[in-house]
Amino acid sequence: MKRILTAAVLILVTLALVFCGPFWLFTLFCAIAAGLAFWEYLDIADAIGAQSPRIVSFVAFAAIYISIWKYPDFLTATVGAIALALLTYCTFHSPVDRILPDAASVYIGIIYVGLSFATLPLLFEQSNGPSLLLFLFVAVWSGDIAALYIGKAFGKHKLAPQLSPGKTWEGSLASLVASAFLTLFLLWVASFLTAHSVDNLSYPGSWFRWLVLAVIVNAAGQLGDLVESGLKRAAGIKDSGSLLPGHGGVLDRIDALLLAAPVLWYAHLAQQYF
């Protein structure tokens, strides 16, 4: 019950911000969620052997979201400057044998958690931003639910036992199918609303294009889940944290989005050239 209630609250808050919130508030929400997940990532990195400079790490992390909010054209330059700044800082503040590992572990976390999750505000800013984000959430969350219950009930063949012993090929396939089916339903809802002069949802192009994209985004989400599982397994922990009742840590909840959101963003950029 705790798991269901927590999920319901998070989904309602997220969708309310997507469809009703201003850009700055949605960006702030993403920054807070990613910041909490980043803290959990640093705990994992430290458990594996890093010595993360926390204050400097969060200053660098905040720079990503300030750039997204105020200076999006300078995002690439910001990411490059962060790399140089972290390496310089660790050169003078970390033990000599820890300079590169400390700087690298923090920088990877900023890219893995901070920059990846920052693609959500970038998607939000598009002309059909709320529609894109709803598509993303449907493709990922429906797959997560299907994989959990179908995998538990019928899963026999392990997907990646060295990373996540509980995941199965049956659950993975169910995730893809559920994502495709719910995407078709979402497209039908959008078409129905448009036919009745309600333009809240917009999915231009063929249904086949969105169906293929849903499968790709879902697959990226499953990979994101496995990536985080591998990090936790290396650190010898079950959950990244305990902040969310019934769900573990924030990183545990957004791990799929950390790969799925950038994939959708890159696909959205690519369609402008093809």
Image (cartoon, rainbow, N blue to C red):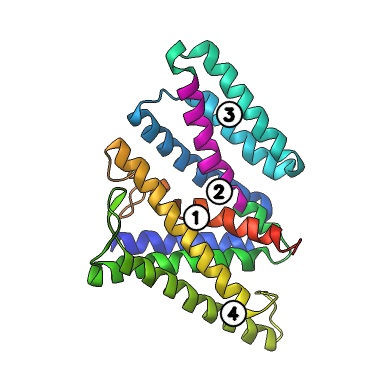
Left/right placement of residue 84 relative to residue 144 reads: right
Q: Residues within 10 Å of mark 4 (few under 14, many from 20)?
A: many
Q: Residue 26: give x, y in percent of width and height.
A: 61, 53
- Secondary structure beneath disc 1? helix
Residue, x 66% and y 74% (percent of image)? 203
Front position in the image: 38 or 215: 215
Mark number displayed over residue 59: 3
The numbered mark, 2 or 1, whose residue comes first in the sequence reads 2
Quadrant into which the C terminus falls: bottom right
Q: For mark 1, what is the residue?
A: 257
The amino acid on which the numbered mark 4 sits, given as a three-letter code, is: Leu
As for residue 103 lying within the magenta part, the answer is: yes
Answer yes or no: is residue 243 visible: no
* Total numbered labels: 4
Q: For mark 4, what is the residue?
A: 187
Q: Residues within 10 Å of mark 1 (few under 14, many from 20)?
A: many
Asked which quadrant contains residue 211, the reply is bottom right
User: Magenta stretch?
Assistant: 100-119
Q: For mark 2, what is the residue?
A: 117
Q: Residues within 10 Å of mark 2 (few under 14, many from 20)?
A: many
The numbered mark, 1 or 3, whose residue comes first in the sequence reads 3
Q: Residue 150: give x, y in percent of width and height.
A: 30, 71
Q: Residue 112: give x, y in percent of width and height.
A: 51, 42
Front position in the image: 252 or 111: 111
Q: In the picture shown, does residue 14 fall above or below 154?
A: above
